[in-house]
Image (spheres, grey):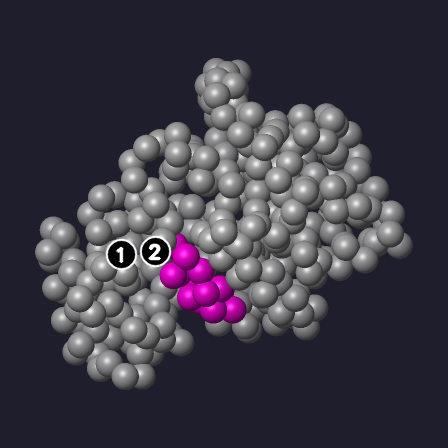
Amino acid sequence: MSQGIRGVVTDLFASAPSPWSGDYFFVRTWDRETGRDCFQISLESEGAGARDARDLVHQVATARGFNPAIEEIPFTKIPSPLWNSGFGGAEFEAVSKKLYRAVAPILVEFAAALNGDATQSYLLALRLMVAHAGATLLESEQRDLPSHSFDELLSLRLLSYRSHYEGVFARVSDPESFERRYAAYYDDLGARAREFIGSCLASPLPAADDALIRSWADVIRANFAEVREYFQAGLIVDQGLTLEDLNKSREVPLQPTRFHSFMSEALEQLLHRNPDFLAFRLQTSLLYSCLHTLGFSLVERYLFCYILARANEDVSGKSTQELQRGLGSLARLLAS
């Protein structure tokens, strides 16, 4: 997040003489029509009128050197902040906005905590991502399986970060050089990443005095079961393109990545049709979007995924292939 955008966020919602008192969310995204990068701030209040909102945004934004485009529309008509996450359905927009509104005050605190120190900012992001994975398990139906401990389930949750990293690794022009650069970061930050995973294994819910990370985990935990129910009812659906979909219009088909070539029917069921896992996927799309909103680039996000994937393998004592087999076994168990 640039210094100017961080200033707008903190001025509007934290440090202004009269911070905005109603519901709000803010998201860095792409304009659906032009494809341009944009920072969207959405305000709602029963007490303040549209003119008050326009005046406040204009005053704060211009003081920070921006010329904002301000539009008054019903809050329900605002585009979903997760419109490009691969999900849809009758309740998707409402639920995605509810989630973003719930984490918005936490993002304000994160914005204030990102003080320009790259190492500390990276460590904060890594802590958040580990706590997020743990929080998505606290109300998960997978916890009801007597065959799987929390430790095992967390290692399989964290495997999703390996999956995310492998998607970009397969598409870069020089993958070996790409991974060498990331490996150097693991040499520097891997010990702390392993420490974060160990802390989550010891106490899945972050300590109350770790207020920022605990607040995120509380929101994820509080909303997980409801999101799952929307998937169960068909009110939110997976609309992401599969490799088969992408290849329908290609003369030269894309090949599965080295990670995704192990896909089976049971895994397809888990990843794309299991409501509990889909709730995890949607909440993780929220996480990725919020990292982008906070100013972390896509390259940095993939770096975080690489670091946590390596740390997960080191802590669990299992290779990527062993974790993949574990996920396959879990998928078969859930499909039976």
Magenta stretch: dominant SS?
helix
Question: Residue at point 75% right, 47% down?
Answer: 150
- How many numbered discs sit on the rendered protein? 2
Place of residue 327 in the rendered image (x, y in percent of width and height, measured from the top left)? 76, 41
Q: Is residue 39 left or right of residue 139?
A: left
- Disc 2 residue crowd, few under 14, some 14–19, many 20+, Cα 10 Å: many
- Seen from the viewer's position, the closer of residues 48 and 76 is 48
- Relative to 62, does residue 4 appear above or below in the rendering? above
Secondary structure, mark 1, is: helix
Q: Amino acid at mark 2?
A: Val
Question: Residue at point 57% right, 42% down?
Answer: 130
> Mark number for residue 292?
none
Image quarter of the C terminus: bottom right
| Disc 1: which residue | 9
The stretch drawn in magenta includes residue 142: no
What is the distance, in whole Å, between disc 2 and disc 1 at their CAs? 7 Å
| Disc 2: which residue | 108
Secondary structure, mark 2, is: helix
Place of residue 102 in the rendered image (x, y in percent of width and height, measured from the top left)? 46, 65
- Relative to 166, does residue 10 appear above or below in the rendering? below
- Disc 2 to disc 1: CB gap under 8 Å: yes
Q: Amino acid at mark 1?
A: Val
Over which residues does the magenta segment extend? 95-107
Is residue 8 visible in the rendered structure shown here?
Answer: yes
